Amino acid sequence: MQITRRTLLAGASAGALTLSTGQVLAQKAAEFTFKYGNNLPVAHPMNKRAAEMAAAINAESKGRIDFQVYPNNQLGNDTDMLSQVRSGALDFFTLSPLILGTLVPAAQISGVGFAFKDYSQVWSAMDGELGAHVRKQIAASSTLFAFDKIWDNGYRQITTSTKPITNPDDLKGLKIRIPPSPFWVSMFKAFEASPLTINFAEVYSALQTKVADAQENPLAIIATAKLNEVQKYCSVTNHMWDGFWFLGNKKSFDRLPQDLKDIVTRNINAAGMKERDDVKALTDGLVAELKGKGMAFNNTDAELFRNKLRAAGFYAEWHKKFGEEAWKVLEKYTGKLI
């Protein structure tokens, strides 16, 4: 399935979409029922691929597994679902490494501001030593584990209702919504902004009511969540790359015999690889799409922002927090940041 702007918009305007596919397969109840939740709209590539993935898992297991998908915060916001997957009330959950950092601090290292210059650096790191380092920390410090292939969220951009962001000084005093993560708070305070931590489920209303004047997200989310309706400007900052670790509850997953574990693992990782391609293709076309809906775009110079972070001590602070070993792995892919 290729995710295009047309299918994105069709999905966004459609009514409720049932993503749980297990019940169509078997006359008898499945041996294992799994619930997977996420915070993204049904039209986002993540949920298109998740629907395919669930159907494949259910079919290949010959009905032994009923893999159910709950998109769009149906099971609660990020904080709620993270709690649920930790306790085993939810079996699987996709979450930004930066929000996961509230539980596993090491997970945040992939989101260091203005670190990755392009996707080739991102995938080399996340499919290589940096991703392996983070997965090891997740497994060691929580009831969770992460599948090998991180899914893509994209490079994050800043949108505002007041003015375009052209240089670091434009961020001073800006009421910008950020996800609930100390890492985001640290970075935007380094830019002298006024960050507000708000769960994604409340972002649209916060922007609509002017609780916040700005937010930052990848273009695919800006489009699927229709944030262009409440934001005028989009500044292409590429300030952070963000992904989604596909997380599982260890105890829940370990109920499966090895053959079924293999089916689930193979299909989740394969869906993640397809979702990466979808997000890139979608993002490449969304600038024109959003411009056509009245959103104004401007480009920025990443080095200006990188220099501001260096001067504010942001990189030095997080180097110390992550430790020499992890920082060395990061800079193996990004080049020197300090």
Image (cartoon, rainbow, N blue to C red):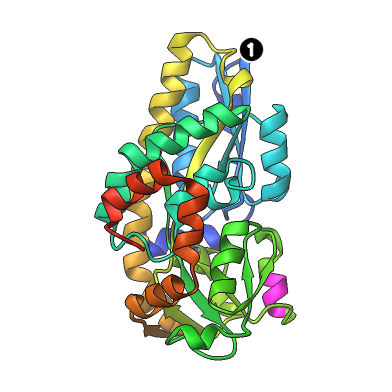
Residue 15 as seen in the image, left or right of residue 315: right
Q: Residue at x 46, y 30 (%)?
A: 136
Q: Which residue is drawn at 54% across and 67% down?
A: 187
Q: Is residue 294 something one can see in this rendering?
A: no
Q: Quadrant of residue 184?
A: bottom right
Q: Where is residue 290 in the image (x, y as percent from the top left)?
A: 44, 78
Q: Where is residue 116 in the image (x, y as percent from the top left)?
A: 33, 59
Q: Tell me, yes or no, whether the highlighted magenta stretch contains residue 205.
A: yes
In front of the other: 80 or 100: 100
* Above or below for 30 versus 70: above
Which quarter shows the C terminus?
bottom left
Q: Position of residue 127 (x, y in %)?
A: 32, 39
Tell me which amino acid carries mark 1: Lys
Q: What element carries label 1?
A: loop
Residue wearing tag 1: 28
In front of the other: 200 or 58: 200
Q: Tell me, yes or no, whether the highlighted magenta stretch contains residue 7.
A: no
Residue 220 as seen in the image, left or right of residue 173: left
Q: Which residue is drawn at 63% across and 18% down?
A: 251
Q: Quadrant of residue 36?
A: top right
Q: Position of residue 332 (x, y in %)?
A: 27, 48
Q: Give the range drawn in magenta.
A: 204-208
Q: Residue at x 33, y 69 (%)?
A: 285
